[in-house]
Each structure stands twice: as structure tokens, then as C-alpha cells.
Image: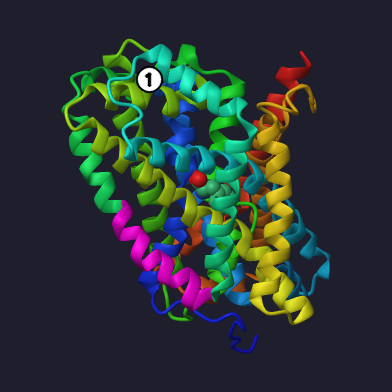
Amino acid sequence: MQEKTSIHGAWASRWIFILAATGSAVGLGNIWKFPYITGENGGGAFVLVYLFCILLVGVPIMMAEVLIGRRGRQSPINSMKDVAIESGHSGSWSLLGWMGVLAGFMIFSFYSVVAGWVLYYIAGMGVGDFIAIGGDDAGKVFNDLLADEQTLLIWHTIFVVMVMLVIAGGVKKGLENAVRFLMPALFVLLLLLLGYSTQTGAFAQGWDFMFHFDPEQLSWDAVLVALGHSFFTLSLGMGAIMAYGSYLPKKTSIGSSVLMIAFMDTLVALIAGLAIFPIVFANGMDPGAGPGLMFVTLPVAFGQMPGGQIFGFVFFLLVGIAAWTSAISLMEPATAWLVEKFGWNRVPSCAVLGFIVWALGVAALGSFNFLSDVKLAGFNIFDFLDFVTANVMLPLGGLFIALFAGWFMKRHATESELAMKSPTLFNAWYIVLRFVAPVAVAAIFILNLIEKLK
Ligand code: PHE
């Protein structure tokens, strides 16, 4: 194929790509979701399965997404189409891009609600609302917030606007400038926080909870959740990474960049767990408290510790930044497609998309108040969006990406795109992508279904 360039621009360097993709990967998934699903699924055994999924499924599939994106140089919908046609297959592979765009909308709609909570907590910490707060009061603050649709609506709206403003700026002025500034800030805040959490007293207990392997704790449900989360946390299976890959300079090595991104993502999740569980145990709280874990336990801990107010503020600021850089990548594929398809400017494209996700988000935030009676397959709207995207759509998207790059693309195309120095390494990747990853995803799906039908 002729060397293509993207009409949307290109990252200034390999580092910018790594920062942007890490920005996408590191988000609420790492800091909010990972600790609470680890808590709900019994700790160490779950963490181990998750790590396996990252390494054997996540990393190879992320490489596939980046290489397809770079080869296609367009939005995932059009890249899938062109790369499929290039390899002599049907352009209908673009459907995979479409499913990704849909998943992006669905994820964004609940993501933005949680990000809204985070913004609310940044403000609350900032003005000292949580000084010396007790467990019951912290629970009340969170529940009151959930019941208050107006406040939720305000913060959700602010978040949607923040995200869309960046995307409207384009790859260079928007995305690149944002991650250049936000990602270093995120790392500094994270280190500050880790230092603080080692001082909390129950560090050993938190450590033990996360890394003590007890196979008894493992259920098929937990394995599916771990698999789904490995896709969610690496932003895989929906085209975000593919879109970022389409702005990647030609010479950049995909393998080492992806390893770096996956490593940083995992590191942040583990650090977040190690920051949160010691606090949970030090205060005699329940690690399986669910989505409220971060919003109820942490304010209590911060409220009682010396300097807690400042660190609480720092913590939620960190989460807010992480959510922001991730949400940007959720909407980039759809934006790029609108620009390609209709030749629109980014600004009207973002206005349209922003409105759609804003409206969906209103439905998601209604799950906690005015729409709490609405149930889809037994879930409220919020939980439904979360469950279906993370545990069904993303693994399915990832499965098809693996099959596409492994079985449908011409071998020489993947080989030249990855440009690995060692043929052995390439072969290892190829085998894992063609056999191990798809079989693992399919097996976990099927075994889970069988378990459910029993
Ligand atoms: N990876 C992000 C997180 O962990 C969520 C995300 C999923 C972002 C899919 C983009 C695409 O929070």
C-alpha cells in the first residue's frame, strides 16, 4: 500500500503517542473501577487473572489495533474498511468500527456521570467539606449527591464540555496540547499520593488483600469481569487506540510503545489499589462496597489524616485528569469519522456528538434518581451500560480485531507495519494473536454462559 498520511494530523513524536495512549488507558477504569471490582471479586485471585489477561490478550490486541490504525490512517470505521479491502476482503469489516463507535457512546455516557462525581468531589475537597467526616456522613454525602439530579446534571454537563472542547481543537492543538500538560501532572500527583498512602498504617493488609492468591475466591463471573476489565482499562476493542494509532509517525516501533503503555496502565491500577485498600482497612470499611468505594471510603480517610484535605483534593484532581484524557479518546473515533464522511469542521462535529453523549449521559445519571425504576436485563441503565460495554462489546470487538489482524490481513502487511527486529518475537506475537488471545476470549465467554445456564 502506498504510504498514507492522516487528514487529521500526526503526533509530533513517539512520546506524544505514548502519552496520549496512556492518557486514554489510564482513567476511571484504573482508579475507580479496578479497586472496587477487585474488592467485589475477592482480591488477589482476581488481580492475577487480570494481569494474565493484560499480558496475553490485551498487549497483542493493542498492537493489532495500533497497526491497523496506522495502516489505514483514518477513523476506525474507514481504516477497517480500507485495510480489509487491501487484503482482498470485504469492506464490511467497517462494521467493527461501527460497533466501536456505539460502544464509545455507551461508555462515555456513564463515564461522564462518574467524572461528574469526581468534579463535585474536587470542589468539595477544595472548600473543606470533608474535614473530619465520619463513615456514615460520607455515605450520606455520596447518596445525597446521587439523589440530586440537578447537581449531577451540572457536573456531567461541565465534563462533556471540557472533553468536547479539547477534541474540537484537533489532534495537534487539542489532543496533543492536553496530554503534554496533563500527563506529567498526573504522574506527579500519583507519586505524591503513593508516598502518602504508605503512611496510613494498614499498608501491609492492603497489599495482602491485593496480592494474596486464594483460588477459592475465583468464580467464572470474576474471570469474565477480569477479562472485560483488561479491555476496558487498555481502551481496547472499540477503536480508540486504533484512532490514536492512525496518527502515529511511520517509523515508530509499535511493540515497544504498546508495552510501555500497558505497563504504565497496570502500574497506575496497582498503585491506585495500594493507595485505596490500606485506607479501607485502616478504617474498618468494606472492600466490596462497589462503585461508591472511592467516593465514600476515601473522603473519610482523608478527612481524618493530617494534610488529608490537601491530599484529598490532589487525589480527586488526579482522577479528574485521568478521566478527562480517557474520555477524549472515547469520542475521537466518531469525530474523525464525521470529519471524513461529511468534510465537516471539528467544531460542528463535536457539537453534534457532544449533544448526543450529553443526552445519553442524562439517562445514565437518571439511574440513581428519576429513572431508577427503569431496568434493562435486570440492571439499571448505568450498570447496564457498564456491563454490556466492558463485558460483552469490548471483548467481542477485541476478538474480531485479533481474528482480523491474525487471519484476514496479509502476513506481510502486519509484519511490515510492526517492523520488529527479531523474527522470533514477531512469530511469538503472531501465534498469541491468532490462537491464544481469540481462544482465551471465546473460552471465557462460552464457559461463562454455560455457568449462567446451569
Ligand atoms: N481506559 C479507560 C479507563 O480505564 C476507559 C476507556 C475505555 C477509554 C475505552 C477509551 C476507550 O478508564
**Rendered image coloring scheme:** rainbow
Residue 167 seen anywhere in this rendered image of the structure? yes
In-front residue for pair 247/84: 247
Residue type, mark 1 in image: Phe
Q: Is residue 189 left or right of residue 450?
A: left
Location of residue 380 (image quadrant): top right
Q: Is residue 386 above or below residue 210?
A: below
Name the residue that disc number 1 marks: 213
Q: Is residue 202 left or right of residue 346?
A: left
In-front residue for pair 408/232: 232
Residue 443 seen anywhere in this rendered image of the structure? no
Label 1 neighbourhood size at 10 Å, few (<14), some (14-19), many (20+)? some
Task: Tell me what residue is drawn at x 29 percent, y 23 percent.
Answer: 301
- Percent of width and height locating residue 424: 43, 62
Task: Tell me what residue is drawn at x 60 percent, y 50 percent.
Answer: 157
- Percent of width and height locating residue 161: 58, 58
Magenta-drawn stretch, dominant element (helix, strand or loop)? helix
Task: Tell me what residue is drawn at x 55 percent, y 44 percent.
Answer: 155
Q: Is residue 172 above or below residue 454?
A: below
Q: Is residue 37 above or below residue 394?
A: above
Q: Please, what secondary structure does the residue beneath circle 1 have?
A: loop
| Magenta span | 171-186
Location of residue 17 (image quadrant): bottom left
In-front residue for pair 317/188: 317
Q: Is residue 337 left or right of residue 422?
A: right
